[in-house]
Amino acid sequence: MARGASLPITIRQVTKGYGKVLALDRVDLDVRSGEFLTLLGPSGSGKTTLLMVLAGFTRPDHGSLLFGEEEVIRRPPHKRDVGMVFQNYALFPHMDVAANIAFPLKLRGTPRADVARRVEQALELVQLGGYGARRVDQLSGGQRQRVALARAIVFEPRILLMDEPLSALDKQLREHMQIELRRLHDRLGMTTVYVTHDQREALTMSDRIAVINGGRIMQVDAPRPLYERPANRFVAEFIGESTFLPVAASAGGFAHAGRVLKVAAPPAATGRCLLMLRPERLRILAAPDDALNMLTARVEDVVYQGDSVLVQAVLPDGCRIGVRAVSTAAAMATVARPGDTVTLGLAPEDTVILGEG
Ligand code: ADP
Ligand code: MG
């Protein structure tokens, strides 16, 4: 299978209600041609609904959907040139692997002679070469997922949609498949919209991530800016671990407990704001360091977690924060103990202020 043509997707003001529930609320989103974009959000946030709108199985109440230059909102699913991998695989259990994969080709009237060749190519691509005659119910979860993927790409669609395709797999296989899916995308180059509720999966796989909550897009960004510069508290809490301290904005900058913070990229916010603290961006200082923002805290708990150690501490105002440190032998030998008072350091470039209190 060669690298094919791909198409940009333009979603404008797409709204879908179910009774009183607004599953999608005026969604605007642009997916670039050939991009791997992930919809990330909690359960019930509207991810599947948006994917179903893209695939054509759900008609929104309002809005426009362009594939390239063409309006497709009224076009039926089989005329959209979209491959879809569903959460539950949705394979035909009574057919063998090859027949499952051949199904979309037959639907599109592909000549018989081409079908077998393309099915075998698709199987090779998902590393199931020679599995065509197996029955679906003889396959493991990971293999079924590959068959579902082969079926979605066998007709070389220009857009590929995947709804939590790895959620039924165990952690190791899931992480392996994340890398494999991403490689396959890079090889085929089709515009891909991927759905997950797993923030690490989204960070691992995506060119960009659209965070969705309550049917609304909260932020669209590449993994690093999304993690490091979340647009609001929801995004900051949903991606990674964080705690928030109230800070006051004034002419002199942002102050916490009467001290002005050193901030590398201060936002244009006023009034009550929040200082976001990520556990791995805080350091327990052996000696004060005036180049950093410093916080005094009392250690409550020290939790060894294998790759890292999590120190739980309380600030004088009662706010609980976590500090994550590497678990090298040297670091473990000097790590704080419960009851210790420690000075925490936060670099100005890691100091993120959210403009909402
Ligand atoms: P997600 O995939 O992010 O978990 P969904 O898109 O499935 O979320 O659902 C978004 C919201 O719309 C939820 O509140 C859900 O209960 C509701 N919903 C989705 N599909 C239907 C439907 N067919 N009928 C009624 N409510 C629905
Ligand atoms: Mg869903």
Image: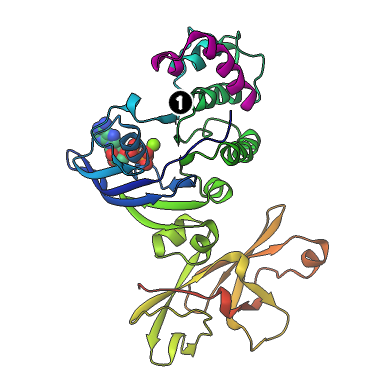
Please determine whether, in this image, residue 226 is positioned above or below residue 244: above
Across and down, in percent, residue 13 comes to 24, 50
Q: How is the image coloured?
A: rainbow
Please determine whether, in this image, residue 123 is positioned above or below residue 354: above
Please tell me which residue lies in front, 104 or 298: 104
> Which residue bears the numbered disc 1?
88
Is residue 123 visible to us here? yes
Quadrant in which the C terminus is drawn: bottom left
- Give the residue at x 53% y 9%: 113
Quadrant in which the N terminus is drawn: top right
**Does the magenta stretch mainly form a helix, a strand or a loop?**
helix
Count of numbered tags: 1
Magenta highlight on residue 124? yes
- Give the residue at x 58% y 83%: 293
Across and down, in percent, residue 143 comes to 60, 22
Residue at disc 1, CB closer than 8 Å to ligand 2: no
Q: Residues within 10 Å of mark 1 (few under 14, many from 20)?
A: some
Residue most extreme to the bottom: 252
Left or right: 286 in relation to 52:
right
Disc 1, SS: loop
Ligand 1 shown in quarter:
top left
Callout 1, which amino acid?
Asn
Left or right: 307 in relation to 354:
right
Across and down, in percent, residue 348 comes to 57, 80
Span shown in magenta: 104-126
